[in-house]
Structure formats: C-alpha cells, structure tokens
Image: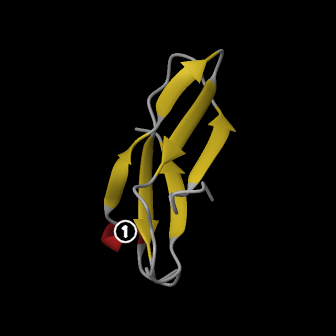
Amino acid sequence: MLPNGAFQFTFTGDPTGSYTVLSTTNLLAPLADWPVAGPATNIGAGLFQFATPPLSNQPQQFFRVSSP
C-alpha cells in the first residue's frame, strides 16, 4: 500500500511482453467476470509495475496478471 491509499505491485516477465491486470472483490468469480483494471507498465529489464488509484474504504480486492 502506498501512503495515499493506492496499491502497487511489481512482477517479472518477458521484457517484450505485454500484461493486463484484472481485479475483483470476489475471488470465486469466474475469470471471465473479472474486469480489466489496466495495463502493467514495463519499468525496465522485464520488471513490470501496476498501481491502482487510491482504494480508501473499498472492499478487499484481488488481482491477476494476464498476458495475451
């Protein structure tokens, strides 16, 4: 968690790949029902980062990274 209430995470992947982050508040929801939260940003050498807007007073969220 960032000081402003946003959530940020990093992960490694194929430096030439593109990744999309999906999110849900219901971990048991079918993957087809997970909305797209946005793209992950390549910050160099196969390291990717994603940050949400501030999540104050939001229910718990789960995230999944997808690649085409």
Q: Quadrant of residue 54?
A: bottom left
Q: Please, is residue 45 above or below residue 31 in the view? A: above
Look at 47% across and 83% down and name the residue there: 59
Q: Please, is residue 64 above or below residue 25 in the view? A: above
Q: Please, is residue 41 above or below residue 27 in the view? A: above
Q: How many marks?
A: 1
User: Looking at the picture, how far across and down is residue 28, in whole percent?
Assistant: 51, 84
Q: Amino acid at mark 1?
A: Trp
Q: Is residue 12 left or right of residue 57?
A: right
User: Looking at the picture, how far across and down is residue 27, in whole percent?
Assistant: 53, 80
In this rendered view, identify the residue nearer to me: 9 or 18: 9
Look at 50% across and 73% down and name the residue there: 61
- Picture colour scheme: secondary structure
In this rendered view, identify the residue nearer to me: 52 or 46: 52
In this rendered view, identify the residue nearer to me: 8 or 12: 8
Q: Please, is residue 33 above or below residue 29 in the view? A: above
Residue beneath label 1, please? 34
Task: Say which quadrant the C terminus sits in.
Answer: top left
Look at 62% across and 48% down and name the residue there: 9
